[in-house]
Amino acid sequence: MEQKKLLYVEDETGLRNRFSELFLANGYNVVAADCEDQAKHLIYCYADFDCAVFDVELGENPLAGVELCREFREKFPLTPVLILSAHTDTGLQEMSYKLGADAYVDKREPLSLLAVRLDALVERHRKMRGLSAEHIDLKYSHIGLEFDELGERVFWNGNELSLSPVRTAILKQLFLAKGKAVSVFDLQDELKIVVESNTIVQHIKIIRSEFQRVDPSFNCIRTVRGKGYRWVAPVG
């Protein structure tokens, strides 16, 4: 089986070695960097990665990992990105998700759980690359939401949306539910994503914001109290 290529950025030698061993043991070809400049060099030199893991704080820059996430997203818009941090404040997590992170993980959590999270993100991305347009119910094509034939790009009324693989998958699940409410737990189960429920909430928030970027009147993703979320087709 072909190894998955992972970009890993961590400035603490002990942690970098420890996590690199974990990733290697789980079948990843680890390309490691110990500082922001080295990471930027690798981003621009490599043609592809299967995933990326960034520590938030590098050297004197407390937001280096988040800034790297943004640069990585510009070159690799669909590749899964996981942010590692010992900081759990909501503002930093929101910033990470807005700049393209697919998951924000406390680096103190069990290593086995981290490996499961990363594998789930990568596997979801690989499955999405194999999806074709025939998986989308074409009778809904008139409402303005379109997925390209690989299921990797999303368009709303002809405008391309900037959504990560996880957010595209979440949107697809809501869309395919045909107006029925989909719970956070159902989304976690369907997508094989091991995350906290508030992480799904953040993803939904960012999906809505991206639609509203191209269509300020967008209101098709509704919150159903006690049940989750549902896609409501626009009138007209």
Image (cartoon, grey):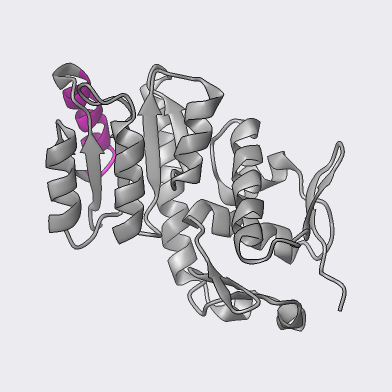
Q: Nearer the viewer, residue 85 or 111?
A: 85
Residue 9 x/y as whole percent: 22, 35
Residue 89 x/y as whole percent: 51, 20
Residue 66 x/y as whole percent: 36, 37
The residue positioned 17% from the left and 56% from the top of the image is 44
Image quadrant where residue 75 sits: bottom left
Q: Nearer the viewer, residue 194 or 106?
A: 106
The residue positioned 59% from the left and 57% from the top of the image is 210
- Asked if residue 215 lies left or right of residue 38, the reply is right
Magenta segment main secondary structure: helix
Locate the N terminus by quadrant: bottom left
Q: Nearer the viewer, residue 198 or 38?
A: 38
Residue 18 belongs to magenta span: yes
Image quadrant where residue 64 sits: top left
Residue 151 belongs to magenta span: no
Image quadrant where residue 194 sits: top right
- Bounds of the magenta segment: 15-28
The residue positioned 23% from the left and 58% from the top of the image is 2
Residue 122 x/y as whole percent: 40, 50
- Residue 123 in view: yes
